[in-house]
Amino acid sequence: MDTQNISARPHAQSRNGGENHPSRRTRAHTRSGGVIHDNARHTTRFTVIGNHLAQHAELSLLAIGLGVHIQSLPTGALIDIRTLAARFPEGKTRIAAALRELEAHGYLRRTCERTSSGRVVTRTVSCNQPGRSGATDGPEPKPRPERPARREGEPPRRALPAVPQPAYPAPDLLRSAFEVLAGLRRGDPRLLLSAAEVEHLTPGVAAWLERDLPPSAVHHALTADLPSEPLHRPAALLAHRLAAQLPPVPPFRAREAPSDAVRHPLHNCETCDRAFRGPEPGTCGGCRPRTP
């Protein structure tokens, strides 16, 4: 009974000791509590997404999901705030903030252009790999410099609060808003803003100016009653004021008639007996003789 079958072939041994065996991998992941992937190969209706976006260390979860959604859309699809807010339940404010995150990290490029008919439109370009553009309508951009690694214990940089958006971002309106922000530091040196912060706050100031407010009124609203202690994040404070203190849209007012307009009394024409207005009685315009 203890005779071995020497004619049986020995079991094949893997070169790495069976580390790639599915059952062993599953047991190992189950013990550690990690994710287990049940993947199937896609052959149709799929989009290649880089891990630099899906696992981005600084983007919010909403920005990552919105970036993946935008990269999966066909060319020409609408990705404005109103269209995305109708598609997703997050609302215009959170979607606008997520778009600004993607733009700040190079996944979106938005520029205002004027068409041949004079209308200003926003051109949006989605980049699936920032710093390495495959577009042929311009020179290839230089690679973005890598940020230094965050030290252990150092708090991550928080995104600025969302600001209101103007209904019609005309170039003159945005230029006036930029001048308001650039002039804040003249009254208070603590309100020195970076170029990125000014770009983030400009639409919010434009939304105030769009409500028939002069630049001096916006300047006063942003600088009045500031705390006396040092401002660690002045751009965040300004963004909060732009959103929390946004004035309402002024009511529509019909153009009034000039106050100095003279309203003549009614008279009956002495020829046809029709009523007409005039300073004195006589004949109406139809019966009045015309001079050659």
Image (cartoon, rainbow, N blue to C red):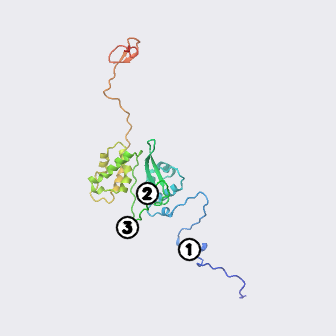
Q: CA distance from mark 2 to mark 1?
A: 37 Å
Kind of element beneath mark 1: helix
Residue 215's spot in the image, x, y percent? Answer: 31, 46
Image quadrant of residue 24? bottom right
Q: Quick one: label 3 or label 2, which is nearer the N terminus?
A: 2
Q: Which residue is mark 2?
A: 101
Residue type beneath disc 2? Glu
Q: CA distance from mark 3 to mark 1?
A: 33 Å
Other residues around mark 2 within 10 Å, as few (<14) / some (14–19) / many (≥20)? many
Q: Secondary structure at mark 3?
A: loop
Relative to 162, does residue 31 appear above or below in the rendering?
Answer: below
Q: Up-down: is 112 above or below 58?
A: above
Q: Earlier in the sequence, mark 3 or mark 1?
A: 1
Q: Position of residue 186 (x, y in %)?
A: 27, 53
Q: Amino acid at mark 3?
A: Glu
> What's the residue at 50%, 62% (across, down)?
54
Q: Amino acid at mark 1?
A: Ala
- Label placed on residue 28: 1
What residue is pinned by disc 3? 154
